[in-house]
Image (spheres, rainbow, N blue to C red):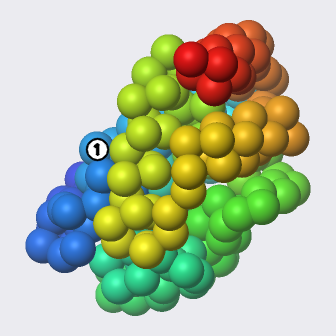
Amino acid sequence: MNIELIEKVRAYCKELMESSRCQELQFHNWEHTEDVVRNAKIIAKHEQLADDTIEEIIIASYFHDTGNMKQAAGHEKLSCEYAQEFLTNLSYNDQRIINIIYNIMATEMPQQPETISEKVICDADLAHLGKTNFIIKNTNLRKEWDQHCNTRFTDEQWIAMNVQFLKNHSFHSAFAKAHFAKQKVVNIEKLLAIEKV
């Protein structure tokens, strides 16, 4: 694994996000990116993937939301463009750039990952659905949609939409299924409990 390259990618993506509208976003910000990278490393390691594959997943994780610096809708395609340009300038292998682009595009909603790499990054991106800090993250997403996407919901609409989303969502990797699925059920119950208050 090329640690020096990964550090260059990290520094570049951090600069992109922290010098743009992403620093004002409550959810799709640098903190989320670092969460996704951290989750991706853990999941990929437990899936016993090769170092080269893990490297591609980590790079894709750093780039996956950089397109948000310009727009929310279709940001994945922009993220791919940033990744391709940056990695091409570093003479990164063409096939590996293609793999990274596929990984980034896999995070587009609705997620339909096919390869194990795509499954890992998708689970890393939505790991918060199965974590104890879900309600905090979900509240941040609602604020972001309200303030930056002009998308507003009543409390009842928001809860109903998220309960439906969590019920329809499935984790893809063996690790995520084993470690995040139970808490996701608890998070659905928490949302339903808020609705009853």
Q: Name the residue under label 1.
A: 31
- Image height of 137 relative to 14, above or below: above
Residue extending farthest front = 197
Q: Which residue is drawn at 73% across and 41% down?
A: 160
Q: Where is residue 48 in the image (x, y as percent from the top left)?
A: 69, 26
Q: Quadrant of residue 10?
A: bottom left
* Mark 1 surroundings: few (<14), some (14-19) or many (≥20) residues within 10 A: few
Question: Which quadrant is the N terminus positioned in?
Answer: top left
Residue 173 visible? The answer is yes
- The image quadrant where one finds the C terminus is top right
99 lies left or right of 88 = right
Please name the amino acid that badge 1 sits on. Glu
| Nearer to the camera, 19 or 185 | 185
Question: Residue visible at 31% across and 77% down?
Answer: 69
Tell me: residue 90, above or below residue 187: below
Q: Where is residue 12 in the image (x, y as percent from the top left)?
A: 22, 68
Seen at 72% across and 53% down, the residue is 118
108 or 61: nearer the viewer: 108
- Label tally: 1
x, y percentage for residue 80? 52, 79
Left or right of 130: which side holds 131? left
Q: Which residue is drawn at 20% across and 63% down?
A: 24
Q: Is residue 27 visible?
A: no
Q: Residue 144, percent across and down?
A: 37, 59
**Viewer-closest of 23 and 38:** 23
